[in-house]
Image: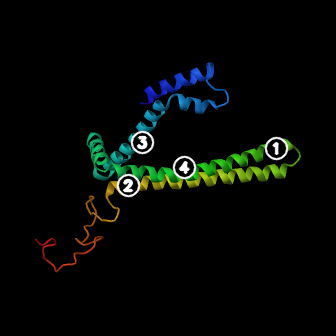
Amino acid sequence: ALTVGAYRIVEVAYRELTVPSDVATPVVLRVARGAPEAIAIVVAAWILAEILGALAARRIIMAGDGVSMAMGGAVRRLVRHPVRCLAAFVAPLVLLIAVVVPSAAASSVAWAAVRAAIQTGPAPVVALAMVVVLVVLWAGGLVLVGMVAAWRAAVWTADAAGTFGVATGSRPGEWPPAVESANVGDPGPPGADPEPR
């Protein structure tokens, strides 16, 4: 997908750079308009690879599956639960974008302030203060991105372990919980048929 998509994107970009179709529109938008199918193929392959890779990696680590068995299980999980898998992909991605965009914008503004303070000349204290602000904003953004990335990984781990609302007790070495652990108890008397006919 990357090879086919990249070939088409490079082809359209070369055409737009040598013989532009519209000089008022930025070249990135012209390339996106000229090769939407290539961009869609690359994005779809990225989404599919991230979902399958996340599920397969957790099957290898948590269940001890081999690579082929883990990939097969990941494909089955995606086919059986496509909405759940897409939600586990999209929700953390939206949060990541919500963290990265403002952080990058703040760092960009701080960098512009650093450049302006350095170019004005005889104000080293102001330039130093702007550099400190830039470093703090950049480091804070990295910490936030790291936290969101860890949360994204935790979402896939919780999904693969089946621990959203139910304790399974099926992992090797884990203490077996009581039958009613983490589940709503049966409202009927003990030993009664839960679904009388």
Residue neighbourhood size for the residue with mark 2, other residues' Cα within 10 Å, grouped as few (<14), some (14–19), many (≥20): some
When asked about the image quadrant of residue 13, the answer is top right
Q: Nearer the viewer, residue 143 or 25?
A: 25
**Secondary structure category for the residue under label 2:** helix
* Residue lying farthest to the top in this orientation: 18
Mark identifier at residue 157: 2
Q: 110 above or below 188?
A: above
Q: CA distance from mark 2 to mark 1?
A: 47 Å
Q: To which residue does mark 1 refer?
A: 118
Q: CA distance from mark 3 to mark 2?
A: 17 Å
- Quadrant in the picture for the N terminus: top left
**Secondary structure category for the residue under label 3:** helix
**Secondary structure category for the residue under label 1:** helix
Q: How many marks?
A: 4
* Residue lying farthest to the left in this orientation: 197
Looking at the image, which residue is at 39% across and 53% down? Answer: 156
Q: Position of residue 7 (x, y in %)?
A: 48, 24
The answer to whether the residues at label 3 and label 2 have Cβ atoms under 8 Å apart is no
| Amino acid carrying mark 3 in the image | Ile
Of pointers 3 and 1, the one earlier in the residue sequence? 3
Q: 95 above or below 37?
A: below
